[in-house]
């Protein structure tokens, strides 16, 4: 199925959805149970814990939640019983004849989440602001949201997903610690800053990646219409946690993104995954008061499998990562 944008129409948020705010329940007062407790986290579908629901908290089922603070603007679908914290808004379809399901919820999720760039820690989502929001949805001939189309469209996408490929369980190669040697990082990589750094406001969305000092999502914060780096490099955040990532594709970086270009060897995603794992073992040395600055990176040493004390065994590193069952998904 194809989306016909001419059939889409703008609706006031509270014309289409009912909204209700969750209730506060601090961690100290939570009693383990079997009801999902939804918080403002963007992880684990928003599920923060499983609890016994206190009498004052309403138990919901088959509804969406929207994070008001914390991870502001993230939306999740819950077909199971749950309670929500006061940092969440519970959303359901106002038309009682429409029953929310996985397909409709998956269609709505990215549309609702598209508003999150207007909100942040200092400007949280509240009921008044949400009621003023407008949302674009496909419409039927009667100018009502076309719920049937939303469901059929997601179903048509799900039918294209093939699950018949079998997971091959490989036996990972064994690491022989006696064949690891210490190497100076600058003998393997040229350590430099990004060729030019940009802020979020200086870029627009496009086909390239915008890599920042985030320790999540491979350091990627959004997409970019421009790039300064060609990819196939390792990046390290020198402002916060100091985490290393492999960037396979073209990207542009924010300030404090350090770039490691390989010297005299051909880097690929398998070798890179091995090396960044070793680099990230050193994160305990760094923190808020001791950042992983470019100068500190340049004097780092790492242990790697080697042919001899002067030659890293890059072939072994590549084959070691390939030996894992999930390597085909890298």
Image (cartoon, rainbow, N blue to C red):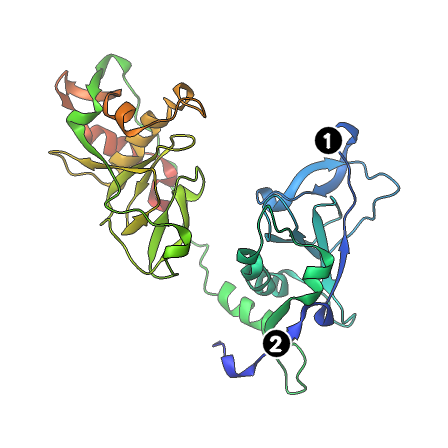
Determine which quarter of the picture holds residue 276: top left
Using the image, tell me which numbered label, if any, was put on residue 27. Answer: 1
Residue 37: image location, x then y, percent: 72, 41
- Real-space Cα distance between discs 2 and 1? 40 Å
Instruction: Please name the residue shown 60% across and 49% down the image.
Output: 72
Q: Choose mark 2 or mark 1, whichever is in front.
A: 2
The residue sitting at 19% across, 31% down in the picture is 189
Binning the other alpha carbons within 10 Å of mark 1 as few (below 14), some (14 to 19) or many (20 upward) gives few
Disc 2: which residue: 10
Q: Quadrant of the C terminus?
A: top left
Q: Residue furthest top?
A: 178
Residue 216 or 45: which is nearer the viewer? 216
Q: Position of residue 146 (x, y in %)?
A: 63, 77
Q: What is the number of callouts on the image?
A: 2
The correct choice, above or below, for 326 with respect to 17 in the image is above
Residue that protrudes farthest toward the bottom in the picture: 141
Check disc 2: other Cα within 10 Å, few if <14, some if 14-19, many if 20+: few
136 vs 20: above or below: below
Which image quadrant is residue 213 in?
A: top left
> Is residue 258 among what the camera can see?
yes
Answer whether residue 31 is visible to the viewer in this image.
no
SS state under label 2: strand
Q: Secondary structure at mark 1?
A: helix
Picture residue at 61% right of the left edge, 51% below the top: 123
Q: Tag 1 or tag 2, which sits nearer the N-term? A: 2
């Amino acid at each position: 199925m194809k989306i016909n944008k001419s059939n889409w129409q703008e609706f006031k948020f509270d014309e289409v959805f009912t909204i209700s705010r969750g209730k506060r329940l601090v961690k100290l007062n939570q009693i383990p149970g079997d009801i999902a407790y939804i918080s403002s986290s963007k992880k684990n579908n928003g599920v923060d814990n499983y609890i016994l629901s206190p009498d004052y908290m309403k138990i919901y089922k088959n509804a969406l939640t929207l994070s008001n603070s914390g991870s502001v603007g993230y939306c999740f679908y819950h077909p199971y019983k749950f309670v929500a914290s006061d940092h969440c808004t519970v959303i359901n379809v106002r038309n009682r004849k429409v029953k929310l399901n996985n397909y409709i919820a998956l269609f709505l999720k990215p549309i609702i989440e598209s508003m999150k760039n207007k909100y942040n820690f200092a400007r949280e989502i509240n009921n008044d602001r949400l009621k003023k929001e407008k949302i674009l949805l496909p419409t039927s001939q009667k100018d009502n949201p076309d719920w049937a189309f939303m469901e059929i469209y997601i179903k048509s996408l799900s039918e294209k997903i093939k699950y018949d490929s079998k997971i091959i369980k490989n036996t990972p190669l064994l690491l022989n610690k006696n064949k690891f040697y210490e190497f100076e990082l600058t003998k393997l990589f040229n350590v430099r800053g990004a060729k030019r750094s940009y802020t979020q406001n200086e870029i627009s969305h496009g086909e390239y990646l915008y890599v920042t000092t985030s320790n999540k999502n491979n350091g990627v914060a959004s997409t970019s219409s421009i790039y300064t780096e060609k990819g196939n490099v390792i990046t390290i955040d020198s402002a916060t946690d100091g985490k290393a990532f492999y960037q396979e594709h073209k990207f542009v970086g924010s300030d404090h993104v350090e770039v490691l270009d390989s010297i005299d060897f051909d880097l690929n995603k398998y070798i890179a995954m091995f090396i960044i794992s070793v680099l990230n073992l050193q994160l305990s040395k760094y923190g808020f008061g001791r950042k992983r600055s470019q100068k500190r990176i340049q004097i780092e040493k790492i242990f790697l499998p080697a042919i001899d004390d002067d030659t890293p065994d890059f072939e072994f590193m590549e084959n070691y990562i390939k030996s894992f069952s999930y390597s085909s998904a890298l």
